[in-house]
Image (spheres, rainbow, N blue to C red):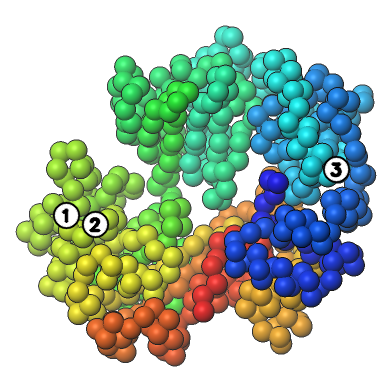
């Protein structure tokens, strides 16, 4: 059963609200599922606590949509071809009937209602949603009608933007349109992919979430190779090489922002069905001040104190896409003064900053982070930035630099601040050197912010759900939870922009002693909390209180610490 964790939570909550499932049973199974990393609804069905028909009833009642037990044999292939087949298969939103200008669709997952605006814009038709069981959707998905529909797909696009038409496409204009659409939407990454039967797909990452661009995907399916070739030429890559990965760089004009230059980091990778491309859009405006990155003022002073120290190591940690680079560049912008010699080793150099010596690492020619660091120490720097600590050799040199009169900034892939200490010990760094070198650790995540234009109270979140994520009994009695309803300003998602969630761990004398004594992570965390340390889940709860992020975003981005 393909069902998002958020949708599963919502359906389970509705089952309890409507009296089909007891609150005690819901609480018990929620805990079990959280421990086993399982989704609630499939477990409820597996244990026969509820029936699929019960789920359909509550969805119908609470979302004001009719039930539908339509079967695959009753759906005409011509109706299915109204939407891209790859979209239907992926999202399990099935067009089942077309009556005049009204398209009827059947779903099992209520979260799919969020696609209404996009489907309406694509089809130019009025929409009526109905709901059926998950098993019925799966039966339709398993039927041959999908293949019949695919063979009848019409690939001519409907577009009011740059005039490109399948069969006579201006590739230059098509590529330009891809870039401009992405820039206008505030996209951070463009993914261009090819699958079986020459089905092309373009996805934009907006506010950290990937979204398929269905109209562009239809156009590109029959023009895939020319588009990739055009991009490789723009990126300075070898168009005759399609067996090996290649990296390059492109500069485009952002027409939605006065025609300013936007640097594009380009990577092409061979896959089973053809080359796939990922492009990172690096706007110069993305280098923002420390006061704008979202660190609370009470914590910002700690970070500024750390980066203004004459020596020591400041590490920024988090998973890929959590905003580590943005935080580090904000720190560099703060420190960038003529009296400081600042050197960076990056892979790649994402933003060019005047007054700073930036070196592009290149493992292929032996220009590794470790080798660059060695060279830096002969360049008389005050501040050194290493894009990422990846291996023992790099961390050894970085530690030595930090304890010999240099400020060392870098990133590490860990889940939280305390785990960073454990990671360094696992990399073979002696505890006394970690204690002597480490100054501050910043761990961070990015959560989508509630759209301010359609913000409303979310009365579906229960007190038990709030207690499960750490709110006290007193807090849940008066706490108001908010969500975005969805509007034109946020493309019907309910979210607009992102909020950084930070925990900042200062390495105090007590923590230094704990590191030297080889204390375990929970013990170090307890010491830190005694000194006023706030974990990411605590900070995220504050953002829920202030109506900045949703309960669902908390679950998506934050792992609760002890």
Residue that numbered label 1 is attached to? 370
Q: Which residue is mark 3?
A: 132
Using the rendered view, name the quadrant where residue 28 is placed: bottom right
Q: Residue furthest front?
A: 47
The residue closer to the viewer here, 19 or 286, is: 19
Residue extending farthest left: 378
**Closer to the N terminus: mark 1 or mark 2?**
1
Label 1's element? helix
**Nearer mark to the viewer, of 1 and 2:** 2
What is the C-alpha distance between the residues marked 3 and 1? Answer: 58 Å
The first of marks 3 and 2 along the sequence is 3
Badge 3 marks a residue whose secondary structure is loop
Q: Position of residue 315 (x, y in %)?
A: 32, 67
Left of 12 or right of it: where is 204?
left
Residue 506, image x, y percentages = 35, 80
Q: What residue is disc 2 on? A: 391
Percent position of residue 443, x then y: 42, 68
CA separation in Å, label 3 and label 2: 52 Å
Q: Which mark is residue 238?
A: none
Q: Nearest to the eye among marks 3 and 2: give it.
A: 3
Label 2 secondary element: loop
Q: CA distance from mark 1 to mark 2?
A: 9 Å
Task: Give the answer, above or below, for where 511 lies relative to 165.
Answer: below
Q: Is residue 244 visible?
A: yes
On screen, 511 above or below 430? below
């Amino acid at each position: 059963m393909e069902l998002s964790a958020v949708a599963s939570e919502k359906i389970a909550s509705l089952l309890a609200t409507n009296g089909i499932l007891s609150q005690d049973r819901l609480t018990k199974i929620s805990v079990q599922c959280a421990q086993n990393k399982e989704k609630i609804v499939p477990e409820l069905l597996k244990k026969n606590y509820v029936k699929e028909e019960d789920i359909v009833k509550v969805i119908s009642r609470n979302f004001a949509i009719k039930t539908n037990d339509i079967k695959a044999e009753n759906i005409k292939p011509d109706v299915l071809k109204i939407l891209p087949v790859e979209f239907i298969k992926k999202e399990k939103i099935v067009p089942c009937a077309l009556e005049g200008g009204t398209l009827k669709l059947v779903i099992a997952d209520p979260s799919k209602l969020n696609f209404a605006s996009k489907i309406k814009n694509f089809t130019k038709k009025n929409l009526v949603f109905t709901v059926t069981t998950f098993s019925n959707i799966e039966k339709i998905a398993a039927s041959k009608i999908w293949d019949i529909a695919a063979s009848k797909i019409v690939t001519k696009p409907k577009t009011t933007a740059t005039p490109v038409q399948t069969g006579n496409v201006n590739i230059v204009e098509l590529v330009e349109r891809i870039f401009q659409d992405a820039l206008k939407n505030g996209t951070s990454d463009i993914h261009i992919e090819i699958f079986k039967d020459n089905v092309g797909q373009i996805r934009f990452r907006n506010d950290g979430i990937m979204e398929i661009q269905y109209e562009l995907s239809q156009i590109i399916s029959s023009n895939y190779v020319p588009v990739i070739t055009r991009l490789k030429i723009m990126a300075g890559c070898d168009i005759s090489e399609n067996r090996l990965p290649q990296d390059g760089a492109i500069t485009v004009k952002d027409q939605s922002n006065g025609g300013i230059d936007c640097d594009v980091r380009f990577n092409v990778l061979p896959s089973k069905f053809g080359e796939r491309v990922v492009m990172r859009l690096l706007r110069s405006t993305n280098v923002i001040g420390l006061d704008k990155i979202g660190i609370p003022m009470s914590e910002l002073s700690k970070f500024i104190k750390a980066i203004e120290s004459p020596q020591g190591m400041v590490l920024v940690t988090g998973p890929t896409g959590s905003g580590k680079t943005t935080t580090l560049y904000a720190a560099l912008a703060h420190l960038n003064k003529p009296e400081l010699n600042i050197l960076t080793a990056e892979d790649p150099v994402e933003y060019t900053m005047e007054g700073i010596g930036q070196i592009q690492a290149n493992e292929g020619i032996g220009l590794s982070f470790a080798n660059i660091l060695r060279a830096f120490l002969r360049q008389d720097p005050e501040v050194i930035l290493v894009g990422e600590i990846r291996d023992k050799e790099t961390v050894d040199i970085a530690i030595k630099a930090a304890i010999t009169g240099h400020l060392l900034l870098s990133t590490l892939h860990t889940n939280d601040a305390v785990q960073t200490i454990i990671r360094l010990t696992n990399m073979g760094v002696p505890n006394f050197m970690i204690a002597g070198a480490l100054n501050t650790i910043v761990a961070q995540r990015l959560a989508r912010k509630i759209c301010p234009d359609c913000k409303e109270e979310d009365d579906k979140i229960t007190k038990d759900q709030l207690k499960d994520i750490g709110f006290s009994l007193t807090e849940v009695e008066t706490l108001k939870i908010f969500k975005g309803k969805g509007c034109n300003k946020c493309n019907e998602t309910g979210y607009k922009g992102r909020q950084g969630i930070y925990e900042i761990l200062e390495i105090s004398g007590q923590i230094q002693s704990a590191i030297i004594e080889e204390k375990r992570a929970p013990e170090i965390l307890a010491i830190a909390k005694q000194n006023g340390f706030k974990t990411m889940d605590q900070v995220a709860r504050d953002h829920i209180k202030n109506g900045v992020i949703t309960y669902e975003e908390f679950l998506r981005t934050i792992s609760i610490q002890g």
